[in-house]
Amino acid sequence: MTSRYGITVPFEGVTLLEHEAWFHRLADLGYTDVWSSEVDGADGFTPLTLAAIWEPRLNLGIAVTPVFTRGAGLMAMSIAALAEVAGGRFTMGLGASSEPVVQRWNGVKYENPYARTRDVLRFVKRALDGEKIDEVFETFEVHGFKLSRPVTERPPILLGALRPGMLRLAGREADGAILNWLGANDVAQCRAEVGEGKTIAARLFVVPTEDADTARFIGRRMISSYLTVNAYAEFHRWLGRGDVLQPMWDAWSDGDRKRANELIPDSVVDELIIHGSYDECREHVARYVDAGVTVPAIAIVPFGIDLAAAVEGLAPR
């Protein structure tokens, strides 16, 4: 299917210390990558630090660490430390995240997300290259910072990007982009903004069941939870789903969440949520790869399935 095939960790219901055996199993099954996130569970760095130590066959990636929730110097130190442990197998993902994560949950003002992402990216690149930085950026200032443990080689840095401005920044100043909550047919539109020759990673949500009603029920709840956040709503307006999703947004705004879920068409769920048999799920992932995703990172949605069976069933063939 592809030379890179990733999965999202940590797994639901599995402690971090229990992941050692899982990392070995993933590598045995042919998974090449494990990608963490940083929302409301584990931080992005700790699961990958464990993976770096326990399983040298796996590539590591974070999708994504918010640029608001760590100071610039700490961000550079965290990246450098994991890069040192991983020995060239680590890709860093930076992103603006969203107002709920940044402001409601972390108490940090969510202001000028594009400028903040750009400034953190520029600072981190220079810091990881060993430069002493004394500069006033648009969104913060740093005076006299220099990493005392510079990395041997700066890891690739991708940007979480949802719209043209950030996608173009990812292509212009980063090593590529991380996509999320899109259909396979949307990849080309995003790829065109990033440009050729850049890495495109994508987190792909998978509900591995042939019960379409169950998959769509789960998918609708996920879609209404995410796509009502402004950043994702604007992304899907740009992708051309404004008219079909407007009834959901209206019902959500009116406080009728049940109705909002009901108003999401099956066709939208089927585009954004991978479901079906294991063969059908792998074929759906392949469509993203064919469209231009270079690093698919599947995320198994827990709904009472056997995790071991799902991990094996979804493994690359």
Image (spheres, grey):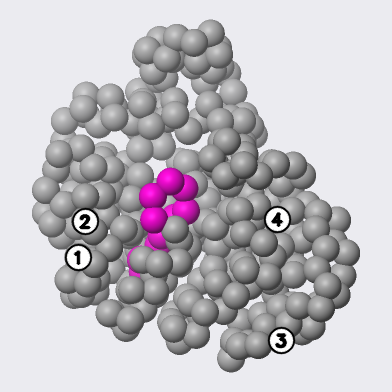
Residue at mark 2 to residue at mark 4: CA–CA distance? 32 Å
Which percent across, then down, holds residue 101?
54, 41
Q: Amino acid at mark 2?
A: Val
Nearer to us in this view, 222 or 50: 50
The residue carrying mark 2 is: 14
The part of the chain drawn in magenta is 33-42
Which mark identifies residue 117? 4
Going from N to C along the chain, the mark reached first, 1 or 4, is: 1
The residue carrying mark 1 is: 18
Query: Does residue 70 appear left or right of residue 164 in this picture?
Result: left
Q: Are the residues at dot 4 and dot 3 in contact (C-beta closer than 8 Å)?
A: no
In the rendered image, residue 36 lying in the magenta stretch gets the answer yes
Nearer to us in this view, 139 or 283: 139
Q: Are the residues at dot 3 and dot 2 in contact (C-beta closer than 8 Å)?
A: no
Q: Are the residues at dot 1 and dot 4 in contact (C-beta closer than 8 Å)?
A: no
Q: Amino acid at mark 3?
A: Gly
In front: label 2 or label 4: 2
Question: Does dot 2 land on a helix, a strand or a loop?
Answer: loop
Q: Amino acid at mark 1?
A: Glu
Tell me which residue sits at (69%, 65%) in the image.
72
Q: Residues within 10 Å of mark 4 (few under 14, many from 20)?
A: many
Q: Are the residues at dot 1 and dot 2 in contact (C-beta closer than 8 Å)?
A: yes
Q: Please say if 75 is above or below 138.
A: below
Q: Are the residues at dot 2 and dot 4 in contact (C-beta closer than 8 Å)?
A: no
Question: Does dot 3 land on a helix, a strand or a loop?
Answer: loop
